[in-house]
Amino acid sequence: MSMCEAVSDRMPAVASGQREWTAEERGHLASCRECAAEWELVNAVTHLGRDMVVDAEALTPVVLKRVGAAKAEARRSRWVRQAVAVGALAAVLLVLRMPDDTPDPLLPRGEVAMESPGELQLAELDDAAPAELEMVLTEFEEPASPESAFEVPDLEGLDMSQVESALRSWEES
Amino acid sequence: MVAMTPSEPHTDAALAAAWRAGDEGAAAEIVRRHAGAVARFLYSAGAGRSDVDDLVQEALFRGFRRLDSWRGEASLRSWLCSIAGNLLKDEYRRSKGRTVVSIEDDQVVDQANPHEEAAAGESEARLRAGLQTLPRLQREVFLMRAQQGCEYGEIATALGTTPGAARVHYHHAVKRLKELMA
């Protein structure tokens, strides 16, 4: 390390009063213009803003209060994020567990696909009186309309044995 | 809780550990030790005299919030100065490049020897103006080294560079400032 480098490295400590120049260093500074200029610069910047006074006693509680508030806010934000995440997860689970009542795109509008007739649910009948239920069941047993039922042959003109024979053949078919 | 006893000499690392454990007295000691240095750093780096108090408060606030991330590789002072430097950069961007050097503050002379004070004020103003012309890394390395007395290793850690690069930045800054101050 050259004398210039050694002197340069010691400048901050000497400028702040922690160290003192040796006689050799002092002699070098007197003879080396570059080092003297650097020393003047370091000395000046060491004292730059020395007159600035910070009231540490007043500053500390302000800083600590802000830090405490920021920590509380961070905790609150974390809690809200977690609550939102749990709520979203619960909503997803709820949706996944609900029966799919979206219309089958292959069916005409207004009709709902049914797995089997046994799964037909008529909530509007839950509160119906027994007499009303009886009436509904009776209507179910009757053909909805003449053309909706299967084709009925003309039975007029048959005697009783021919009618019975016709009924038996329907039952077998 | 790691409570500090009044007679015990405390390192910054011990104070930081005590603060993390909830000792507010340790935080007060950290502020007492470093607030003035951070103020000088900010003022020298270009902060207006009237802005320094707010900036010091903000730098310390950010420092305490992130104190868990300070591992002690860099000194606490150089670490706080690097936070202050980032803060000043943010302020500079927010003001859209408006210079934050308040030369008029330096030229207020109300001391016994007005000529001497005026000369000192002028010299200080030139130095501050010269520092403003340096690239940010050169300016911060120079201030941490020359003003705060930090070693190149800790400066490098605080500013995310290498000790060799920090030394080069310092010498570039010195060369440039010598030219400007001549």
Image (cartoon, coloured by chain):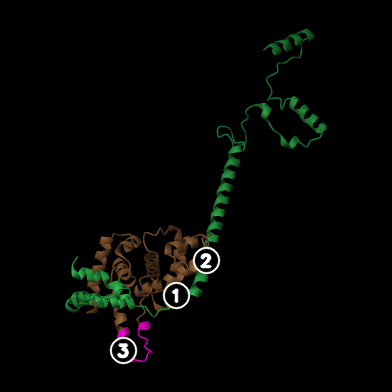
Q: Which chain is brown?
A: B
Identify the disc placed on residue B116: 3
Q: Please tell me which of labels 3 and 1 falls first in the chain.
A: 1
Q: Which residues are magenta?
A: B104-120
The residue marked by circle 1 belongs to what chain?
Answer: B
Separation of disc 2 and disc 3 at Cα?
44 Å
Residue A129 seen: yes
Which is more toward the observer, A128 or A9?
A: A9
Q: Which chain is green?
A: A
Separation of disc 3 and disc 1 at Cα?
27 Å
Which is more toward the observer, A65 or A113?
A: A65
Q: Which residue is mark 1?
A: B53
Neighbours of disc 1 within 10 Å: few (<14), some (14-19), many (20+) = many
| Residue A152, quarter of the rendered image | top right
- Give the position of the C terminus of chain A as an image quadrant: top right
The residue marked by circle 2 belongs to what chain?
Answer: B
Q: Is residue A145 above or below residue B167?
A: above
